[in-house]
Amino acid sequence: MEYVLGSQPNMTGPGATGGVIDSGDGRFGMTFTRNTAAADAPFVVEVTDTLSQGWTAIARSTGGNPFIPLVPGVTATETGGGAVRQVTVHDDALMSVRPRRFMRLKAE
């Protein structure tokens, strides 16, 4: 995971992950970094309503390319330049409708 996030595996600290955020319009989201040089390691953002259900992929990055939404209503934006970019992915579900929502970043 350190490789795809562009963080240093031998250093302690908060790492390359950002955190859970509110989109401003009531949608759940997360922010993290992406290493553009990690073209051989696709990764995906997934969501679920309960940890006992399966996960649904909502955005994916392959070949070192930017994240693309896989579900209507999902947004994926990137900022920054160079090898490490900041990525923000927002879910399609409103937090008021689905207040219990889990989100994860998974390297494939």
Image (tube, rainbow, N blue to C red):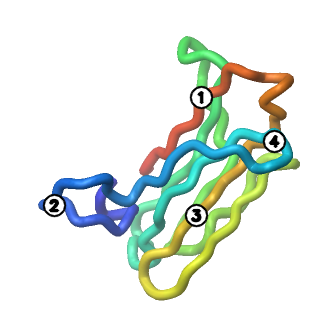
Residue at the farthest top position: 52
Three-letter amino acid code at the position of disc 3: Val
In this rendering, the answer to whether 64 lies above or below 32 is: below
Q: Nearer the viewer, residue 65 or 75?
A: 75
> Which disc, if any, is residue 87?
3
Three-letter amino acid code at the position of disc 4: Asp
Separation of residues labelled 4 and 3 (CA atoms)? 16 Å
Residue 16: give x, y in percent of width and height.
38, 59
Separation of residues labelled 3 and 1 (CA atoms)? 18 Å
- Number of numbered tags placed on the structure image: 4
> Which disc, if any, is residue 86?
none
Three-letter amino acid code at the position of disc 2: Met
Q: Earlier in the sequence, mark 4 or mark 3?
A: 3
In the image, 19: left or right of 53? left
- Residue, x 41% and y 62% (percent of image)? 41
- Residue, x 75% and y 49% (percent of image)? 23
- Asked if marks 4 and 3 touch (Cβ < 8 Å), the reply is no
Separation of residues labelled 1 and 2 (CA atoms)? 28 Å
Q: Earlier in the sequence, mark 3 or mark 2?
A: 2
Three-letter amino acid code at the position of disc 1: Phe
